């Protein structure tokens, strides 16, 4: 139209333009009228208001607050996350994946008025409640995606009403019980995702009625265990369309499994049978008919020896960890498409064959936890593998010479071997190197002095327990560092000041060296620092400086024990140490494998702690939520700073072996999570505050070698201690000591003292508030951490008993 007008005169042109414009306005208006139906729009706006939008406390997930951009005065069909049927204006798709929605999905939610939905995608939000039965009202749904939504309770039987469903995702939730029988009606279902949905019971036989299934994911990972148990029914072989089957961590309860049942599934491309707890032995060659197989994980299943191991199809990923393999699987030589190989935790000895490094696509290799002693071929043999990204050779018997690595190497894990001599300087040329772990070897010489160079991106440097000497120099510090462990070496000199530029640093452990420096208060400016261990070095001088805040606000492990620190800790010293005073936590430093299998490397942070007089090494997730202060074995004097009582999440407090004086602050009883308290070998006087009897988790305590007096407080935890925990105090009496207490006005005296102390405490709390703006904002911890905590408790319990 416009084109023909252009040929005419100006006036005609203008007229045409007006016509054109008004025409388009009409078109637009008709969109408004016909596209967005008022009832649908209102339902959506009400749905929006059922939730509050707030970033979830989950790591590094990038989301989009889609609903915040919805406006009543605009066409709802143009809103983010909405698609309408263009003819009827009915909302047919709602996709609010990862939109930070918080709040329960109510049974009468206006969502259920969107009767025409074909696709409902609400994954990765926080509904923190049950999935209401009314979900069955959305009867035209084809796609229903509710993965990682913090849903719990039973899966409603009304799901069986959704007979058009082709795609159902309920993975990573906290459901209980079994799949409802009604789901047997879902005979159009092609994809069923139930990974880590925390379901339990026998194999859901209703699945076998779903003849269209191409994908079943019933798998799990170690920390979110579906809890399916019992036999895998052989009728699974009827699902001939399956290309993806994940039954990992299915608990067959040590029963025999007839692997032939999988052979009918000729379309299988992905098969994960890891850790199904069977005692059957498997000859992988039976998988020969599975010509499409590209991903196979048989970890935890006993495999027959390598001569019969073979697979005809071109594999991409092969994971055979803990399969009791004794010889390097030779058939891999012809697996030229392999890019991910894991044959860790087997019994393979000798040399890694030279041909391995000629597989052209190989990028990830895990041969850790075997008994390899070397690499066949010349010292640069691995460099043939020009695309290698990750190499894990840890826990073997590798020794000198250290292999030359290809320039593509991003993650190199070589701990627990027998390497010696200096780390070859060729390591400095690996410009992609992100993770270097060489702990527990016999390296000597200096730490490579080439990571400061602007071009390296090194973020994990673990060189623990070697023989490195000289200074930890500034040239060894890359500003990308996130985790540094150079503990248990013979490093001297000062801490490298360039650490101040490592804004991502979370973990710094230099324990057991001979570093001689003043207290690195400057580290408090590092915004991510969570763990600082200076234990057992030659650090000296005060740790508190007048006029300077000492608040390390993300720190949760502070271990400066066994040094020569001195001086008085002012009473507000621990004000502003927010991470220890609230349940907010950052779980970044947990090795990534705990978040499921991925490629970002497996290294473990570790720290040593002293409990019951002996050293314990805590590794990996064990101390993921661990909050501790250890200033023992220094020369501190003066009173115990009262602000310690603010650190309510503290689990271990060790101030022993100093010269602390004055009395024990009763406010210590606010540390209700405390499990271990050691105040021994100081010059503390007065009484043990009776309030400490209330600390129900306090399993370990030591008040010995002080000048304490009066009755030992009542309380089951205290009374069950050994008498040695109270020994060498001239005036203490009562159980568990032999000395009985004489009667007399002691209790009243005690009450009076407490009154005075409370007032003191109050005044510095008021002063501390300024330091701690975020002190009470920590409600967001979530169940993940709780489960880590549970595991930690169990392990600690085990250590202590
Ligand atoms: C949207 O606007 C209409 C008309 O202005 C009004 O009737 C309706 O209540 C509004 N909806 C919401 C959810 O505010
Ligand atoms: C929906 O499912 C429930 C429970 O399975 C059932 O009682 C109800 O009759 C079903 N409704 C329809 C319309 O099919
Ligand atoms: C599976 O389908 C068969 C008929 O095809 C039916 O008899 C059986 O009840 C169904 N099983 C379940 C669990 O729905
Ligand atoms: C797993 O299921 C078994 C019985 O099927 C039950 O005894 C056990 O408590 C369940 N475990 C968990 C973690 O739910
Ligand atoms: C690899 O393939 C070649 C040629 O097809 C064959 O000769 C050789 O035996 C195969 N090697 C193994 C270990 O299967
Ligand atoms: C690795 O990169 C360096 C330059 O950084 C280059 O000199 C060397 O040849 C490369 N090595 C290989 C094996 O490609
Ligand atoms: C490192 O150890 C090797 C033997 O493994 C020895 O020859 C060398 O002198 C040592 N170097 C240093 C700096 O101690
Ligand atoms: C770092 O990279 C730049 C360009 O990529 C290069 O010019 C420079 O020489 C490199 N520096 C070092 C120390 O390798
Ligand atoms: C930190 O980085 C800045 C900018 O790159 C640099 O000027 C400064 O010297 C560094 N500080 C230390 C202590 O290395
Ligand atoms: C290598 O395998 C071991 C044992 O199976 C496992 O613990 C480790 O996490 C794996 N390494 C990587 C980088 O995934
Ligand atoms: C200890 O807790 C009590 C009660 O929660 C509170 O009143 C008091 O201020 C707390 N004291 C300190 C030092 O945090
Ligand atoms: C999810 O919501 C619940 C209740 O609203 C809240 O307690 C929890 O901290 C939230 N979880 C996350 C990860 O934000």
Image: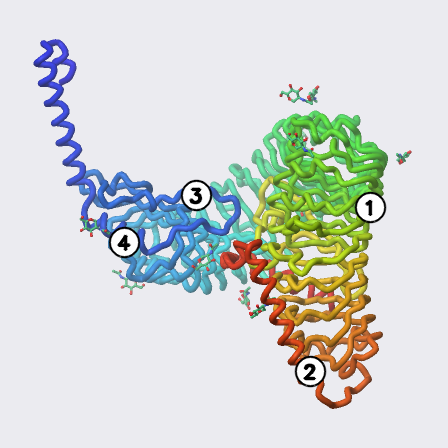
Residue at which label 3 appears: 63
Residue 402, picture quadrant = top right
Q: Is residue 325 visible?
A: no
Q: For marks 2 and 3, give the CA distance.
A: 59 Å
Q: Nearer the viewer, residue 438 or 366?
A: 438
Closer to the chain start, of discs 2 and 4, is: 4
Q: Is residue 272 above or below residue 180?
A: above
Name the residue rendered at 82%, 52% in the picture.
564
Q: Nearer the viewer, mark 2 or mark 3?
A: 2
Question: Which quadrant holds residue 85?
Answer: top left
Q: How many marks?
A: 4
Q: Is residue 686 above or below residue 49?
A: below
x%, y% of residue 112?
27, 56
Residue picked out by circle 4? 46
Give whichever of discs 1 and 4 has the lower sequence position: 4
Q: Residues within 10 Å of mark 3 (few under 14, many from 20)?
A: some
* Residue located beneath label 2 in the image: 749
Is any atom of residue 386 visible in this view? yes
Quadrant of the image containing the N terminus: top left
| Image quadrant containing the C terminus | bottom right
Q: Can you say whether 273 is above or below 354 in the image?
A: below
Q: Which mark is residue 513?
A: 1
């Amino acid at each position: 139209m416009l084109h023909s007008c252009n040929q005419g005169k100006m006036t005609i042109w203008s007229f045409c333009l007006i016509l054109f414009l008004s025409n388009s306005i009409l078109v637009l208006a008709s969109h408004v009228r016909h596209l967005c139906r008022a009832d649908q729009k209102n339902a959506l706006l009400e749905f929006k208001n059922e939730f509050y939008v707030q970033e979830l406390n989950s790591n590094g997930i990038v989301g989009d607050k889609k609903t915040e951009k919805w406006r009543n005065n605009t066409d709802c069909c143009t809103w983010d996350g909405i698609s309408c049927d263009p003819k009827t204006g009915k909302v047919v798709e709602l996709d609010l994946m990862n939109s930070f929605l918080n709040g329960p999905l109510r049974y009468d939610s206006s969502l259920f008025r969107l009767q025409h939905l074909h696709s409902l995608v609400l994954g990765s939000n926080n509904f923190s409640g049950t999935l209401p039965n009314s979900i069955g009202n959305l009867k035209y749904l084809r796609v229903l995606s509710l993965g990682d939504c913090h849903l719990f309770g039973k899966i409603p039987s009304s799901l069986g009403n959704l007979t058009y469903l082709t795609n159902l995702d309920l993975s990573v939730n906290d459901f209980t019980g079994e799949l409802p029988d009604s789901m047997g009606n879902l005979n159009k279902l092609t994809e069923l995702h139930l990974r880590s949905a925390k379901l339990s019971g026998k194999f859901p036989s209703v699945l076998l009625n779903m003849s269209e299934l191409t994908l079943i994911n019933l798998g799990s990972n170690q920390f979110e265990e579906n809890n399916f148990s019992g036999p895998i029914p052989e009728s699974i072989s009827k699902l001939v369309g399956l290309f993806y089957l994940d039954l990992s961590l299915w608990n067959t309860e040590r029963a025999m499994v007839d692997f032939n049942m999988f052979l009918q599934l000729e379309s299988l491309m992905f098969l994960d049978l890891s850790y199904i707890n069977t005692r059957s032995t498997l000859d992988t060659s039976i998988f020969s008919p599975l010509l499409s197989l590209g991903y196979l994980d048989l970890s935890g299943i006993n495999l027959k020896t390598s001569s019969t191991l073979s697979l005809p199809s071109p594999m991409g990923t092969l994971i055979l960890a803990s399969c009791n393999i004794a010889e390097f699987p030779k058939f891999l030589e012809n697996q030229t498409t392999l890019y991910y190989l894991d044959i860790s935790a087997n019994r393979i000895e000798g040399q890694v064959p030279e041909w391995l490094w000629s597989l052209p696509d190989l990028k990830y290799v895990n041969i850790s936890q075997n008994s390899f002693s070397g690499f066949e071929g010349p010292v640069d043999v691995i460099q043939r593998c020009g695309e290698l990204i990750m190499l894990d050779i840890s826990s073997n018997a590798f020794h000198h010479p250290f292999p030359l690595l290809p320039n593509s190497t991003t993650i190199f894990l070589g701990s627990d071997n027998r390497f010696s001599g200096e780390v070859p300087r060729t390591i400095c040329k690996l410009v992609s190197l992100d993770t270097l772990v060489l702990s527990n070897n016999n390296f000597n010489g200096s730490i490579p002095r080439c990571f400061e160079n602007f071009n390296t991106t090194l973020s994990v440097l673990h060189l623990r327990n070697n023989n490195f000497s000289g200074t930890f120099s500034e040239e060894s510090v890359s500003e990308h560092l996130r985790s540094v462990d150079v503990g248990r070496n013979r490093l001297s000199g000062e801490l490298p000041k360039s650490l101040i530029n490592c804004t991502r640093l979370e973990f710094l452990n230099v324990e057991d060296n001979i570093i001689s420096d003043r207290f690195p208060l400057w580290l408090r400016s590092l915004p991510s620092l969570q763990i600082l261990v200076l234990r057992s070095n030659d650090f000296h001088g005060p740790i508190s400086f007048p006029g300077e805040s000492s608040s390390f606000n993300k720190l949760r492990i502070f271990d400066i024990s066994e040094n020569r620190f001195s001086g008085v800790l002012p009473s507000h010293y621990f004000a502003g140490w927010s991470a220890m005073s609230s349940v907010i936590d950052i779980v970044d430093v947990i090795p990534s494998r705990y978040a499921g299998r991925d490629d970002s490397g497996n290294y473990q942070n570790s720290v040593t702690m002293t409990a019951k007089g002996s050293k314990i090494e805590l590794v990996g997730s064990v101390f993921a939520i661990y909050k501790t202060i250890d200033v023992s074995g220094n020369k501190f004097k003066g009173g115990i700073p009262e602000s310690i009582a603010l650190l309510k999440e503290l689990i271990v407090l060790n101030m022993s072996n100093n010269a602390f004086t004055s009395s024990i602050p009763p406010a210590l009883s606010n540390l209700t999570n405390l499990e271990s308290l050691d105040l021994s070998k100081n010059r503390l006087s007065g009484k043990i505050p009776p309030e400490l009897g209330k600390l129900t988790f306090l399993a370990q305590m030591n008040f010995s070698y002080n000048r304490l007096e009066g009755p030992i407080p009542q309380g089951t935890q205290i009374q069950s201690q050994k008498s040695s925990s109270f020994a060498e105090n001239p005036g203490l009496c009562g159980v568990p000591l032999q000395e009985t207490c004489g009667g007399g006005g002691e209790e009243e005296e005690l009450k009076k003292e407490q009154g005075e102390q409370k007032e003191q405490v109050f005044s510095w709390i008021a002063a501390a508030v300024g330091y701690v703006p975020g002190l009470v904002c920590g409600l967001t911890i979530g169940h993940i951490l709780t489960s880590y905590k549970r595991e930690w408790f169990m392990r600690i319990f085990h250590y202590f008993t």
